[in-house]
Amino acid sequence: MAILILGLALWCGGHFFKRIAPDARAGMGAKARGPIALVLLAGIILMVIGYRMSDGAVFWGRHPATVGINNLLMLLSVYLFAVSGMKTALARKMRHPMLAAVKVWAIAHLLVNGDVPSFILFGGLLAWAVSEVIVINRAEPNWTPPPAKPASKEVIAVVATLVVYAVIVAIHYALGYPTFG
């Protein structure tokens, strides 16, 4: 479980570095992007390895109803990620669509994974996303929505959502985590 927690700490630390030490981060300039990206990548790798290695008490498991709800929430989560990248009309209404996607993703996974390692991983990432929104909103209270994009971006976001969702499902099946049924 220590590897999982270390990965989560690297992820959170890498993202909060700009907020915790703004002068140090500003002093590093663009040179910090590479090292921070490596810290985040290491965090992801350790979270995946740590989660797969971890074992803990189980409080609830998969149920057909929760699996269906999870799949719908995951589709919404992937769409929110696409909205964030495409700057669609929804992104003009939401300040943090990517962090909203993380929150939906975490809730969806907690719904079908009621064990301690899942509480740490998905609950930890949910807490990080909520904290990140609060910290960003306090540091930058004024927000200007992105400029309007062509309607074709909406279509691309929907198509990208379906393609990425299919890839995610395939990866889950390959890793032994059936996403349906």
Image (cartoon, rainbow, N blue to C red):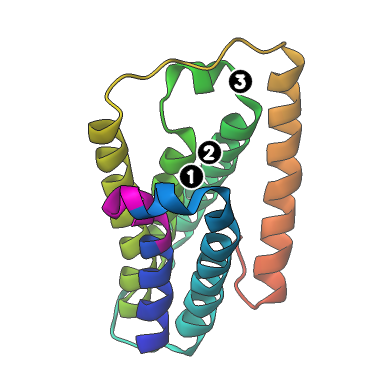
Residue 18 inside the magenta-drawn segment: yes
* SS of the residue under disc 2: helix
| Mark-to-mark CA distance, 1 and 2 | 5 Å
Which amino acid type corresponds to the residue marked 2 in the rendered image?
Leu
Q: What residue span does the magenta drawing correspond to? A: 14-23
Residue 165 belongs to the span the image colors magenta: no
Tags 1 and 3 touching, CB below 8 Å: no
User: Of circles 1 and 3, which is in front?
Assistant: 3
Residue 25 as seen in the image, left or right of residue 149: left
Pinpoint residue 41: horizontal percent, then vertical percent: 57, 68
Q: Which residue type does callout 3 highlight?
A: Thr
The answer to whether residue 95 of the structure is visible from this angle is yes
Q: Mark 1 and mark 2 in contact? Answer it, CB < 8 Å.
A: yes
> What is the chief secondary structure element of the magenta stretch?
helix
Q: Which residue is mark 3?
A: 88
Q: At 76% from the left edge and 44% from the top edge, which residue is drawn?
A: 163
Horizontal relation, residue 23 to residue 166: left or right: left
